[in-house]
Image: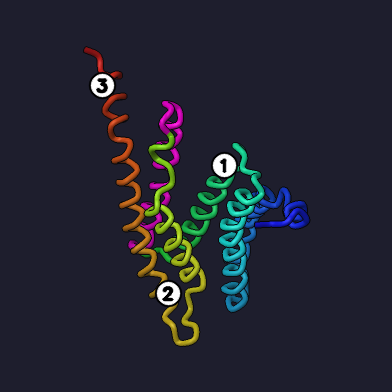
Amino acid sequence: MMNATLKKFFSGWAMKLTILRVALIPLFIITYYFHPESWQQWLSLWVYTIACISDFLDGWLARHLKEESAFGAFLDPVADKLMVAAVLIVLVQQNPHVWLMLCALIVIGREIWISALREWMSGIGHRGVVAVAKIGKWKTTVQMFSMGFLIFREPWLGLPIWRIGQVLMLVAAVLTLLSMWQYTAAAYRYFREAMTTATPH
């Protein structure tokens, strides 16, 4: 629990961190193409790491300071999705491998589908049915680490960084498909009802 002084000091930081994450997107892109390459790897990885840390901290602060808001609930996932899309796009552009492109399509496609699904479910009053599940959190964690390894690319301390990133990204893609299926299955009953209502007799 935070004391009153800390609460006052950190008040408003949750929203600022979310906005910072959005602002870090163009900075990440700039540092990713920075030269010399030895600097580029560390700079882009640090920017990405700060964005990942801010993703955890903004939610934690909002909950502990009781500063959760409708705007924050909207902006936080938008910031996450924009960062993920930006990272995957530059990774594919620099490393045009079929497996990476397919993984990127799966991840970005899932984000678009789930966002639309939640919006629709919210509109019919059943958003809780597609609330964040554990598999979604696992997917996010694995995905976060995989992109970090792929950003750095080069072997470090004898570790095959790129290969580790490949494996983690493939695992993330599988978890992405499983989570998409889980959310869609949870909403299937409402799909059927909507289709029945929309179908002329």
Q: Residues within 10 Å of mark 1 (few under 14, many from 20)?
A: few
Q: Of the residues shown, which amino acid type is indicated by label 1?
A: Ala
Q: Which is more toward the observer, 195 or 47?
A: 195
Q: Of the residues shown, which amino acid type is indicated by label 2?
A: Trp
Query: Which SS class for mark 3?
Result: helix
Q: Which circle's residue, 1 or 3, is located before the other in the chain?
A: 1
Range of the magenta residues?
A: 98-126
Q: Pick the quarter of the image with the N terminus.
A: bottom right
* Magenta run includes residue 123: yes
Q: Which is more toward the observer, 162 or 68?
A: 68
Which residue corresponds to mark 2? 162
Q: Of the residues shown, which amino acid type is indicated by label 3?
A: Thr
Horizontal and vertical percent for residue 14? 66, 50
Q: Which circle's residue, 3 or 2, is located before the other in the chain?
A: 2
Q: Residue at x 63, y 49 (%)?
A: 62
Query: Which SS class for mark 2?
Result: helix
8 relative position to 96: left or right: right
Q: Residue at x 60, y 49 (%)?
A: 63
